[in-house]
Amino acid sequence: MKKCIAVLLAASMLLSLAACAKKEETTKKKKKAKKTTEETEETEETEEPTEDTTETTLEPTTSETTTAATTSTPAVVPTPDDQLIYLGLDYPQQDNDWGAVMGENDLGYVHLKCDDLYLLEVAPNASPKLQDAIDEVILDHQDFNQDTYEADRQVLFTLKGNSEAEGYHHTYRFATELFRADTQVFSFAITESYDFEEGEYETYNFHSSTGAPVTQDEVIVDRSAFIDYMKSTLAPIGDDEWINSMAELAEKGELPFTMTYDGINLLYPNYYPYPFVYVKIPVSGAESLFNMDYFKHAPQYFTLFSDHLGDESVIWDFDGDGKDDVVEATSEFDDTNGGCDVHLKFNGNEYKTSDEGIIINDNALMDFCIMNTDDGYYLYATMTGVDSSFDTAVFKMENGTFKHVMTYEFIRFSYKGFINPESFEMITEQLVMGIEDFYNQFSAMGNGGKLDYQYGYFSAYGNPYITRADITGEKTDDNLVTIDSNFTIPSGSAIQTAFFSPSDDKLVLNVITENASEQYYVVVDYSMPEDMPKINGEALCDILENYDYAF
């Protein structure tokens, strides 16, 4: 079942889910077109397409796509005076599907979570050739994850009631990280795929207007000097083996990098809670090593992430005087008050939250980003909580100093590469059916830098449970339109959290069925007393077989 990870404002739920259904149809068309391409290639020697067929083909053939991505004339690089525009993009767009059965004593499950990079057809800045280039490098990985998951799901359901089912805890994840998506450059990385080895990833940079690759030599104009600069920049990481491996790849012209507005990123593995930390090689101070036509200009509203090189920093002309400014962020734990004193610097001028009498209830600052919004620049610091959670502290940047706006508990950015301040995804931890990650689209616009979630329902698709009692509720279709207002989920069913509305404590359960196309939603009443969450007034430990979460 296709599910959109960004859920739906109650008033616009029907339209949003209808768009999600359209996305599924489009994805099927893409895959169908790909298969049609393969069939065409097999008959190429004996049958030549007519002129009319060529004009109406949904996708070019594989050989045509490859040619476009390797031999097309590179696009004219916009000058720094040109205004970049965001491409139309529905990101992140995901398949999120589960299979779950009860063994003898415990649950077995399989889980598919598959990203898609999909340029919206209605967006005037989206290039068909760019979509072809993206599809060329992601479709095979997507298909592998989807096909392996579906085969494993069929096996799982044959083991219902069998102890062998309890050994099935398999997740198939195809994950991407977007870094730029504008009229000049489309840059992303594939950070996870079931056909990857541990620590494996792929990076891609494309000219947005042609789909042609942006090569290392187009971006880096002095290879030897750049390698020396890269080594010195990365030295604080302290991993000489990894640094030398990057230098060797750069020497061959094969550096696996992504692009931002203020530098290039390298992916350093094993960084919780994200699969990689994105280490920035800034262009500031090393402009002679880079083709600066690619850097130091951005769309009207944009985000810059810190460099992840020890003392976190961002370099940009924030005050508009034509000179680079340096913003730095550190923190110090206050043993007396049991919290964190955040230290921020603008060109060396230091601000401390303790100066405002504020101590943030966290352990330390992990990293930060700066968003240019309709109300100026705001700094968003990701804080590590005292209970291993993550919080987000917001600061207003103005006149070379900072002011604390507020701190959001148990909330963090889903992605650390690309954020359009007008709409982006964040994760919040909620105690619903255990501790679960809930997702929503947020905006930093129009409210003094505060993070406003855009949809009334948060989405989760959390771990499944098996019911040990009947659960009554309101059965709905995929658009949450009522089918049966007095429906009963029978005992022995596999359920999971799908959506949750904190404003009215409405919980939407997804009922997992053997035939994925027959899955359905049920809306139930939810409450959260201090001792135990309840559905329809019944404690979860009384109605779920494998519920063992202790409060």
Image (cartoon, rainbow, N blue to C red):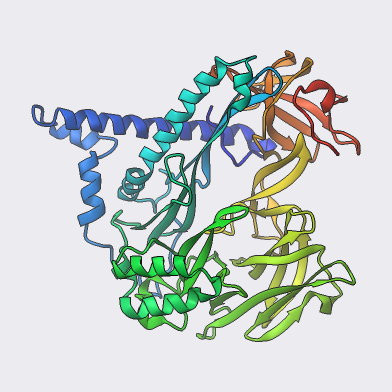
Looking at the picture, how far across and down is residue 314, in whole percent?
A: 57, 74
Q: Residue 68 placed where, x, y %?
A: 23, 51
Q: Position of residue 90 (x, y in %)?
A: 50, 46
Picture mark count: 0
Of all residues, the one furthest to the left in this rendering is 46
Judge left or right: residue 59 versus residue 420: left
Above or below, 329 relative to 48? below
Whether residue 222 is visible here, answered yes or no, is no
Q: Residue at x 71, y 83 (%)?
A: 350
Location of residue 413 with respect to 538 vertically, above or below: below
The image quadrant where one finds the N terminus is: top right
Describe residue 51's horizontal placement relative to residue 116 as left or right: left
**Residue at the (51%, 66%) spot, across then down:** 279
Residue 134 against residue 374 in the figure, above or below: above
> In terms of depth relative to the viewer, which is nearer, 181 or 237?
237
Q: Which quarter of the rendered picture does the C terminus lie within?
A: top right
Q: Quadrant of residue 459?
A: top right
Q: Residue at x 20, y 42 (%)?
A: 63
Residue 201 makes an appearance in the image: yes
Q: Is residue 348 above or below residue 280?
A: below
249 displayed left or right of 123: left
x and y percent of residue 521 in the render?
66, 24
